[in-house]
Amino acid sequence: MNSATIFDSEILNAIECVLDRLLTPSFETPAAGLDRIYEAVRYSALAGGKRLRPYLVVSTADIFDVPRDYSLRAGCAIELIHCYSLIHDDLPAMDNSDLRRGRRTSHKAFDEATAILAGDGLLTEAFTVLADEQTHPEASIRTRLIRELAAAAGSAGMVGGQMIDILAERGEEQAEDIELLQGLKTGALIRVSARFGAYLADAAEETVTAIDRYAARLGLAFQITDDILDVVGSEEHTGKPIGIDAKNLKPTFVDLLGEAGARQKAQDLIESAKAELAPFGKKAEPLARIADFILVRYS
Ligand code: GRG
């Protein structure tokens, strides 16, 4: 299954529109350099992808009836960070990958310097979007979004997880606690995506905690299925090379548990993620569907 067959097409289309708008330059006569950076940024960010993170923001925010204008912008800010991380992850100094989302990676389509700058541009733009009043009229809520996203994406979050992963690949550090590594590298952004929906509604702390518990399990299950797809998936469906974890000597859940064990663990995590949604009743059904999708995804 791909996300387009399971996710609500109205939300997916709205995400694409908002991303396109956010990445449209406002100047009229660009210099050649500005032309190129926008071309590179748009090449990677508007190149498909499941849009799981913005979809999670919108689906969680919908539980609390947050206006879609807010949740779409907040979700797209997270997607910009995600797109930057993919561009940088694919660079020769990291995974050295030629294919992403079914097309040439940024450094292959442009060059390394342009790819680094495109990632930097996306990372920076994310915070411009969150700081804007169109994302939420309350300054205190905007500040919280900025603080939480910075924490999730930074050295104590995704960047830190990537560092542990790189050291483990080089054999300089044992990734003994693979759940910690993946919780940072992949999980932090998925968790903050779900929490964003609750922050936008200024929900009570126990509500934020319940949403976060759901998303922590979802994020781990997502990483496990990513590891499985790297072994049994197809390049045609994932849009990226298969077997890259083994090639790069990455520690994975499949190494740790075997394929059947990894599948079972993902299933258990999805069941317990859905159990966390009980307090939200029918309004959380879209979040339950996202959880089910993780187990059947092939991209
Ligand atoms: C370079 C700072 C820095 C961090 C990189 C996210 C990441 C950290 C690396 C990506 C490597 C990777 C394949 C991780 C596994 C899980 C993951 C994040 C997969 C890609 O996310 P999807 O499947 O991608 O949501 P799409 O293309 O659908 O958006």
Image (tube, helix red, strand yellow):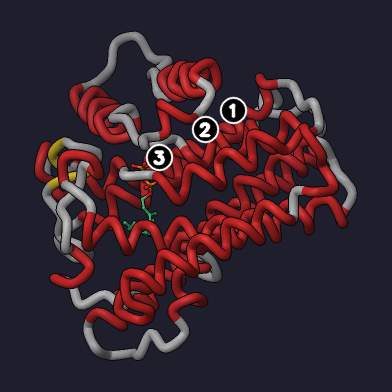
Query: From where the camera sits, is residue 75 visible?
Result: yes
Badge number at residue 73: 1
Q: Which residue lies most toward the top here?
A: 28
Relative placement, left or right, of 194 versus 102 is: right
- Residue 213 place in picture, x, y as percent: 70, 60
> Residue at left 52%, top 41%?
53
Judging by the rendered image, the residue that carries numbered circle 3 is 122
> Residue at left 71%, top 39%?
197
> Residue 32 versus residue 196: which sits nearer the camera?
196
**Type of residue at label 2?**
Cys
**Type of residue at label 1?**
Arg
> Residue at left 66%, top 20%?
69
Tell me the quadrant of the picture where the N terminus can be found. Answer: top left
Relative placement, left or right, of 139 versus 157 is: right
| Image depth: mark 3 or mark 1 in front | 1
Mark positioned earlier in the residue sequence (3 or 2): 2
Label 1: how many Cα within 10 Å (few below 14, some 14–19, many 20+): many
- Residue 65 place in picture, x, y as percent: 79, 26
Quadrant of the rendered image containing residue 163: bottom left
Secondary structure beneath disc 3? helix
Tally of marks: 3
Secondary structure beneath disc 2? helix
Label 3 and label 2: CA atoms lie apart by 11 Å
Badge number at residue 76: 2
Marks 2 and 1 in Cβ contact (< 8 Å) = yes
